[in-house]
Amino acid sequence: MPPVTVTFLGTGNFEAPGRYWNSFVVQAPELTLLVEPSPTALPNLRRAGFAIEQLDAVVISHFHPDHTFGWPFLVFEAMNRGRTHPLSVIGPPGVEEFLASMMRLGAVEEVSAQAHERLSIDYLTPQPGAPLQLLGGAHLTAHVVEHVTRLTCFGYVIEVGGHRLGYSGDTHPCAGLEAIAASSQTLVLECNGAHPSPTHMDVEAVRSLASHHPGTRLVVTHRGGDVEPGMLPGILVPDDYDRIELTAPPE
């Protein structure tokens, strides 16, 4: 079976000079997912060699701007490129209205209306803990994680190509993150670094999670400017545009 790949379009956050906003593409033979439509997602998709026509789904963890403000430009690109096949948008409760309000505030509401007339866009909010079926026999399971109290924030486990790929979204240590780590063979994990309030993972929290789940490969993204690879021995710390392979375990 061909390997599933993860291409990191950006690995940074608000305080990471020289790196783009956290976003990545999961690509399997019959499924291509964009995880987080960050502000720099579209130009980085182009640079990494992905066309808007390739995307089958866009996955959103929560509604903060560094995770979502690329959406209007993806819609423009889909319109301009004449995209025809359906697109699923997967996110927390209220995802459709949140993205619509973004288009209204950007004074491009008419573009959104045209896009929904011409394109098949399906908005989906998974029930936490219940697998959502995707193309090619893949499944996605949402877990509620703790980030900020005013938002429902999701992390995910994506079962694709015989591999279980976890994504933390933005979180601090919590039961939802533990469930994702326990269910994943590879976990893409945020590490914002030192933070004035307990809303993100820092280096010590990542080390602790790694010690609790030694069988899970951790890959750090959403990396703060003070988080260096040498602080996380044994943990993969990719740069923008790096690509990793996910291989299914032997039968």
Image (cartoon, rainbow, N blue to C red):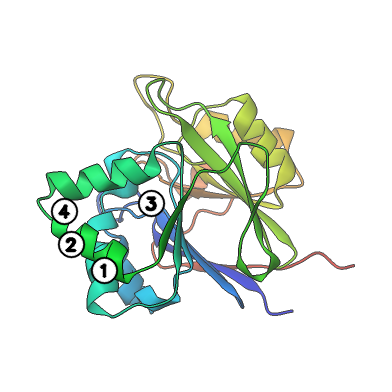
Label of residue 111 in the image:
2
Q: Are marks 4 and 2 in contact (CB under 8 Å)?
A: yes
CA separation, marks 3 and 1? 13 Å
Label of residue 22 in the image:
3
> In front of the other: label 2 or label 1?
2
Q: Kindly state the secondary structure of the residue where label 2 is placed.
A: helix
CA separation, marks 3 and 2? 26 Å
* 29 lies left or right of 85: right
Which label's residue is closer to the chain start, 3 or 2? Answer: 3
CA separation, marks 2 and 1? 20 Å
Label of residue 109 in the image:
4
The quadrant where residue 182 appears: top right
Can you see residue 201? no
Taking 191 as reference, is 185 above or below it?
Answer: below
Q: What is the three-letter code of the residue carrying label 4?
A: Glu
Q: What is the three-letter code of the residue carrying label 2?
A: Val
Q: What is the three-letter code of the residue carrying label 3?
A: Asn
Q: Position of residue 242 (x, y in %)?
A: 46, 67
